[in-house]
Image: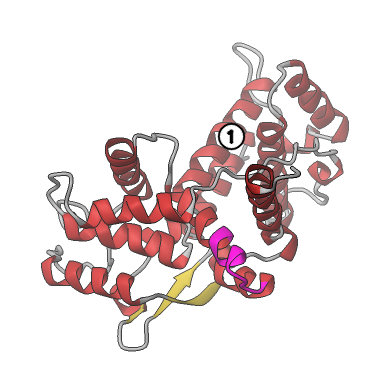
Amino acid sequence: MPGLTDHVEGFLAELRQENVSAHTLRAYAADLRQFIDYFSPPGAEPPSVEKLDTLALREWLGDLYRQRLAAVTMRRKVAALRSLFRFLVAHHVVETNVARLLRTPKAPQKLPRVPTAEQTNSLIDQVAEGRLERPLPARDLAIFELLYGCGLRISELVGVNLADLDLAEHWLLVRGKGKKERQVPFGAKASAAIEGYLAARQAAPRQTALFLNHRGGRLTDRGARGIVKLYATALAGDASIHPHSFRHAFATHLLSDGADLRAIQELLGHARLSTTQKYTQVSLTELMKVYDKAHPKA
């Protein structure tokens, strides 16, 4: 009879088939293995899932509080557990999702750090100038142009296939979270960067991915993160800039220039408008900085 560890491995295997991001998969795998360890005394087998009731899960959550983990970390661990129990209910292993009754700790509202339009464009211009000696400079430039020009998540960027590009009409088919698809436009600079990269692209046989590594296979999200960090550190002197910084910049700069919030929601692929609304707070914060700096009565 399958035990808790077997069910967790089955759940993770299903996530891989659903093509969730590598980052989410690694986090959920680590969280659920720590969950198993908590209920497995040294030399003992993990309990059966049927024995994990709400009281047991609350005891586990209490231990997370005692460890003084950040609220966002605890929220992710609870989310992983809820997803596992949804999987167990769907496969008729248990009747109810007991993890659904756990109270999720509130995470503090933390506004994303957003580079200005000048900082963003300065970095991308330096990438275009070839300031760094890199084996695939055209690919690197196309990565930056699409990250900022389309507001893509890193998993969405590396998931783009050649067939998803419409260079004539400047549209890109993007596969977001939960396999949801959306159409995103891109501008002339991104189009020129993509065409420049396609002219130099060298793919392994039958490789359909747009962005490739040095072996001609699909670039991984970790590889793309490393490329962004390398340029940001070397050219901007800021190792804190990461791929999601360009997504934040994309949304914030659009909003600052008068774009409709619901249009930005569609472009980002947010399921809820409330997720997009955090960018209004970023814009207001920047507006207050300008006011405090420039107004004589500030």
Q: Is residue 216 visible?
A: yes
Taking the spot 25% from the left edge, 68% from the top edge, the residue there is: 193
Taking the spot 65% from the left edge, 29% from the top edge, the residue there is: 35
97 shown above or below 163: above
List x then y, in percent, for residue 31: 60, 33
Q: Quadrant of the N terminus?
A: top right
The residue at the far front in this view is 296
Q: Quadrant of the C terminus?
A: top right
In the rendered structure, which segment of residues is drawn in magenta?
Answer: 252-260
Residue 124 vs residue 293: left or right?
A: left
Residue 272 vs residue 225: left or right?
A: right
Residue 47 sits in which quadrant? top right
Secondary structure beneath label 1: helix
Taking the spot 61% from the left edge, 73% from the top edge, the residue there is: 259
Q: Say what amino acid the circle numbered 1 marks.
A: Thr
How would you rate the neighbour count of disc 1 (Cα within 10 Å): few for under 14, some for 14-19, many for 20 or more?
A: some
Q: In the depicted view, which residue is nearer to us: 61 or 69?
A: 69
List x then y, in percent, for residue 275: 69, 58
Q: In the depicted view, which residue is nearer to us: 24 or 105?
A: 105
Q: Is residue 159 visible?
A: no
List x then y, in percent, for residue 289: 65, 45
150 shown above or below 66: below
Residue indicated by mark 1? 5
Residue 225 sits in which quadrant? top left
Q: In the depicted view, which residue is nearer to us: 31 or 147?
A: 147
Q: In the depicted view, which residue is nearer to us: 154 or 248?
A: 248
Q: Is residue 258 magenta?
A: yes
List x then y, in percent, for residue 269: 58, 67
